[in-house]
Image (cartoon, rainbow, N blue to C red):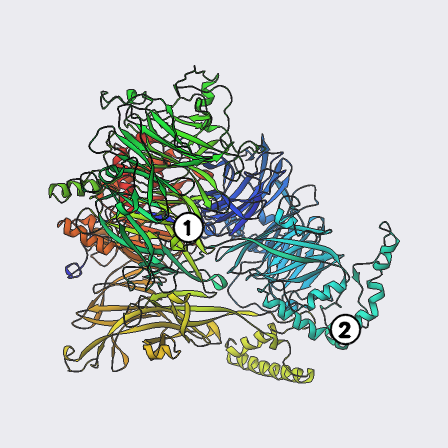
Amino acid sequence: MASKTRGVPSSRPIHPCLLSVFNGNFGAEYAVWAYITTCRKTQLPNLIVAQANTLRIYDVSGETGKLELNQSFPNLSGSVCYLESLPAEGNDADSLLIGFAGHPRLAVCSLQAAPPLTANSKILLATSLVDLTQACMDSSLGSVTPLEQDLIATLLKRQDEATLAVVLGGGVAVAAITLNRHNCTWRASTTDDPYLLNLMNLSPLDKQASAASTTANISAYTQKIAHRFGDILSCCFLPGYTEPTLVLLHTPNRTWSGRLTGGSQSCYLTAISVTVTHQCAAVLWSVPVSVDALSIQPTGQNGCLVVSANSILQVTNGGRISFVLALNGWAGITYPSEINPNPWPLPRLAIALDGAKVHMLKEDLGFVVLRYGEVYLLQRVDTSWSLLPAGETIGSLGHVSSILVLPAVDGKLKILEKRKKDGVMIGLLFVGSRLGDSSLLGYALESNITLRDVLKLLGSSQRRNEGISSAAKRDEELSDRGNEGYELILQREEAALYANDEVDKLGSNFELPIPDIVPPSDDEENTNNMALLNKKGCNKRSKLVRLTVLRFVIALDSITALGPLGPCCEGPLAINNRQIKLERNQQESTGTAKIFPCGYGSSGGLALVTAPGRDTRSILVEEDCLNVQSIFCLGSFILMGMLPDCNKEAGLKMLSLRKKTKGGGFQISQVEMEKVITDEQYGTMDIIKKGQLLTAYELKNNEDICLIVRTRTTQYCYNLIILQRTESSLQATLHQTLSTHSSDLLQVSPFINHNTSTLFGSIWSFGCAVVYEIQANGQIQEFIIEGEASLVEAEDDDVELFYQCNRVTAIDIFRASRNIFKQANGSRRREKKAHKTSSSRDLDDEDRVLYESLERTSRQEEPNPDVISSQRDVTEDCVYVAISRQNGELQIFEMTSMTDPVWQTNGCGQGTARLNPIQKRATRFPRMHKVYAQEIRFFPSGPSDGYQDLFFSVLTNFGDIHVYEVKMGQLSRVSLRLPTRPSKKQSEHHIKLRRKKNLPGNAVDESILNPKEFYHNRFTRFSDISGQNGLFAATTRPLWFVTERRSLVALSHRSRHVAPGGGKARPVGSFCTGMIKSLEVSSSIFMTLHERIGRVGSQRLTVFGGISNFFSPLGIMPGGGYCVEKIPMGVTVHRVQFIDDKTVSTNDHPLYVVLISREMEVDQSGLNDDGLSPEERRRIKDEKEEVKIKRQVEADLGGFDIEQEWVEEIERENVFEVNTSLGGAPPIRKSAYSLWIVDASNNWDPVDSYELGEFEHGLTMKVMYLTEINVEPGSNSAIGENVGTDNLFVTVGTGIVDADGEDVSAKGRVLLFEVKREDAESLAAGAQIAELSLVHEKEILHGPVTSLSCLTTEGRSRLVIGAGADVNVEQWGMRKLTQVGFFRATMQILDILHFKNFFILSDAYDSLYFLVWRESDKSVTLLAKDYEPIPVYASGLLSRGAAMTFVCHDDRQNLQFFQYAPGDAAARGGNKLVSRADIHIGAQTVSLESHFCRSSILVNSATPSSTLAALKSQDSLYGRSDDDQRLGVHFGTSDGGFSTILPLNEPDYWRLAALQSVLANALESDCALNPRAWRLFRRTPRRGGCRNNDRRKGVIDGDLVIQFCDLPTADQEDLASAIGSTVELIIDNLLELQCSSMVI
């Protein structure tokens, strides 16, 4: 019967593809300093950060201290879990040692130039790859669980040799490896297998017990894992030994989940001498340490520090614990031995180091950053350690993941040098986070600070910044209570403490032996409390005389990161607080954005993901127009060139843009040219009115306008007209006909002002280029760059003859530094240029040139002062002329010397990875494609008032865009991974429109380039748009090219109500930018002319005032064509939903409801003193002991165990006893949940809120409509007669955990809120915009409410509740919720997904359930389920046509694809979901959302609904094929990434599957990782999870196949031939694939 269920989706297989939109590459879970690309002598080292499967290399600017992105590797085939540097000698580049999670692997990598067949210009080339998977499996007897535990590694560096120790499987084995440096390259030892320490024989713990347990019935295999080392928590090498000495921090046994009892368990610190060469090891010593030990920090010759949650232990190289520093009053419980409080006069501590990070600056000094950002200074004075609060808190951190200190940056960082004083040590402190923002700080340390200054620092009420740590405040209060009488003590010891002031008078050579630690005296301030001091395990407080203090901390830079991304929603942005407004309709919506909860704690907030053009907050005005070919912004005028033969009355229109006199806003009005342009001498009015405007430009003085107009009635007649501005008109001052050499003008470059003249270049149909110089006196000078005419008579398949032609195909004129291009050694190959030729000379070693791309480039060289890779040197700049020829040659001339090029290369337009300045190179031309550069453009990119880099862009005749970075005298290609060609669907739609005669007569198919037609530029340089310089590409896919941290990013431009692709090849027909002073806009404006929906040929002119807030400090450009604006809230946002009700949310005030939690520190100072006397405490303790003895006797007589709650309470009280002589009780972290309504127009501030209970956790929240049904279930009344209206509710599901925690099962509540909006009168009286009103609450007794959803059938909407293992269907009526149906699952329901009347139920332990709701009998019936024990975190729907697939994400970071296929043999009669495919994504997510997959015809639209409606009106058959009815899945990850899953048709899938297989073998992978192994399904170790050993695979790795777009054309041909396909077909598939991933 299940197979015949009505409406069940088709069981045809769907082929999925996983494609990352952008990666979470802004976090810094691991960090290290290394000289990778910088110079050791003059520059700071690189900062290398890694998170998940991304790694980034930053440069630290020596002037500003800002971080500049040098290299990024966003898609490593493995998750990084260890990162360390391997130093090199001299100026050679360092190497990196990278460890990967999962199967234990470590790679020794160096940054090198990529091989030829690589999509990137640089690669992390692995010189060694150490795979310890087999060793881990052998040691764990084939168990799967140890393979999933991240490796723990430590490194001992000794000149040309390093010893690496790796802990496998959490402690099942320890491997030791030797790394050697040969010829500047680090490599692992050549031995086949690493040395595995024999932990069974090395165990120092109770060897007799270990030997007794080894009996005859225990096999030898079991002895391997019975090594008594337990869990190994941390490891490091101890310096000071001849042989490498490894220290392991471990437990005696495997840990368990029970409560921590007072000292019954201990951790151990064991030192092992390891000799890898002889493969032997010996235990030197082993000491017990605190039970809460976390990590080890080496301290040079003094041994190491054991960092615990409540204490810090100093362990010497001989294995003796020399000092124990208490961090709070519980330290005596976890380490019941001699413990020292924080020395006087520092405050006693009340902190905990769980989650904190420690980095030692030197042997006796280090930084400590607590979990949430509080900074402390850890230091040793003589033999005592102390912890000094720095009074600083790192803001927006979320949770610290790594800290890194770079001391002694003297002379390399100017911003710190300005504030440096004598005796102060400056350095850099980097605090990284994976949940929030990472910060780079500059610090100054001053040593030998006297006690008076220390007290001033501690007693100062005004802190150095506003983010003072709350822990520091508590420390001061605790210190004041426990150390009364500071002034009295100062008076008694003033002479001794400040005796050095008198010593200074005796001379600098005189030394007074004053100890740094003053011995405790009998009259110490806490003498009155001798009872506490004399307790066992407590020492008298030492007194410090001198300290090292933190003088200042400067925030140099902050890396804004998204952190974890939660379930998203789509909603509008605010419009009333923007500075500019729409002119046409003030109530028009601003478009929508994807809104994600992001971050955690102090870094929490919302992430608004959108694209340029979609956010209309920056639109000044819009105007519809018709038959416009080009637009130009000139001062206060807008010139519009009309299409040929469209308007015979005027070839040019003139518009004006100005502010409205009333009502605000802007307006566009047409200007009569006869009233503005006057010509009494040249008679140019007729030419302007009837000619074709090709280009226009403002001359240098901004008072003249230069026009180039073609006369339509005369062949080869091109007019250059200069109009001079007067007070009220434009006067023609020059009219000259350009010499055409009886040929057509094909292209005109942008104009460049140089000194007193203006330059521009042109290309003519006879194959040459001409550069024109318009001098100040009106004279025009020509410079000809010769070339051959195109060989039109050549056969189509004669590719070799095509590449022999040197016709000039593209030209650009740009300004740059005089020494930006490096002069190549030797003579250059000369061509006929500027009427002069010279002979060429070949290089001596052609083989070296041929394989030069394989040469090593990671060796660091001294920077050449003659090579400048940016626009920083603006004092000496010159004008360059760049041309590209049909044979791929790129030549660059200086305008002052047009005879010989200063730089030239081959391969331009063919996708070559690097364009080097060479004399001759054996160029590998494509064999099947005639490709050349149709347009080239050099452009600076970066902040308008800051550092700018120079880039080079190429547009080929096929529509491909190549972008290169100009650096160190060569051009390195930037990986865009963006197919930009016109799609096959666009061409098909264009043919349909022509067949139906829907195109106007003057329409030109721009996808087919006519070599005799004038080519309007697609590339436009812009400056000072939202404070940025860059490039706009008006191609098939309009793109912005801007930089973020000096790294180029491509942004996809969207247009509102744009026409479907196919009518015109380019959606944005023209783009211009300029500064209009009359508008009083601070930055440059820009205008776009795009094809509008309606009659084909309709257009819309849009004037923008900027690119929104993408370049703000909280703006992020992560890639994929998107921009992200982060809205900080300082709380953790769990859910966000738009209130989609016009009565509540308006365009002026869009309202959202968010479920948040505040992360707070709860003060536990009440535990320090309970207010009882010692006699009362003793009496209460004796009474409890008597009760315990009585219960024990009863248990012994009754024969049962005592496991009642009262016993646990007694033990708990014993553990939490605070010893105030050591410190206070540390604060505990607590979350308080609330429901907010926020107004997007008011900086997303809360409008109203509802606080949940103290122990209540908000788990889920949805905004939904519920139908009011006033009928009791089971009654005889007809439902139809009692169905009311749909009411909007905000539903919240909670879980209540009592104060007893896990000892009592959790319960839940369902809360229903109404949102009431206030009327205008109330708002005028000062009332808030909206108000939350609780209308109903329902207690759920069988578990926390984890899922809420809306089920709509037959016009009735009901609430579906998932709580515990139950699914309840509730209906709203009579002001309450009433259960009408239910279903019971196995364990714990995590999520419920609906489509039609079907349910996809996600069980947190038992995979997926497929259910159906039957309205007739109000029942929920199981159709099928997956029987594998998979913990499901999220589920989603993927469909193509009538076929549907269920997607689930599990705890092992896998995606599985299931189908309901009753007829399949694997379905077991229809009651099992059939697994179709699986893949490993390497990230965690909590939500899978569905989206409509757009085709390339719709992807450029900011309003896809209107464009889709226009497309259906043009093509009535659109939407009937399966490819037009596709639903994909998108999700945000816990690492801040964003990915999509897309359905493919059968031919595309098999084509891309073959390409994926070829690329996996052909492309060089970073770190020598295997992309195939990275995507393999990770099996679960639970129960019978490994019984099914078949991996389905069947998913296309989109991140791998999309790299095909960045390969050279010749390599693309080879790969396409290898799979029996063509380059055009593959790129078209990739284009449609990426268009489908455009969620926004």
Q: Position of residue 1046 (x, y in %)?
A: 48, 44
Secondary structure found at label 1: strand
- Location of residue 1124 with respect to 880 vertically, above or below: below
- The answer to whether residue 1326 shows anywhere in this view is yes
Which amino acid lies under the numbered mark 1 shown in the image of this protein?
A: Met
Give the residue number, with chain letter if any, for mark 1. Answer: 1117
Task: Say which quadrant the N terminus sits in.
Answer: bottom left
Q: Is residue 873 left or right of residue 1024?
A: right
Q: Quadrant of residue 1400?
A: bottom left
Which amino acid lies under the numbered mark 2 shown in the image of this protein?
A: Glu
Secondary structure found at label 2: loop
Q: Quadrant of residue 1369?
A: bottom left
Residue 1202 or residue 1370, whichever sits in front: 1370
Give the residue number, with chain letter if any, for mark 2. Answer: 525
- Are there few (<14), some (14-19), or many (20+) residues within 10 Å of tag 2? some
Give me the C-alpha separation between circle 2 and circle 1.
57 Å
- Location of residue 509 with respect to 918 vertically, above or below: below
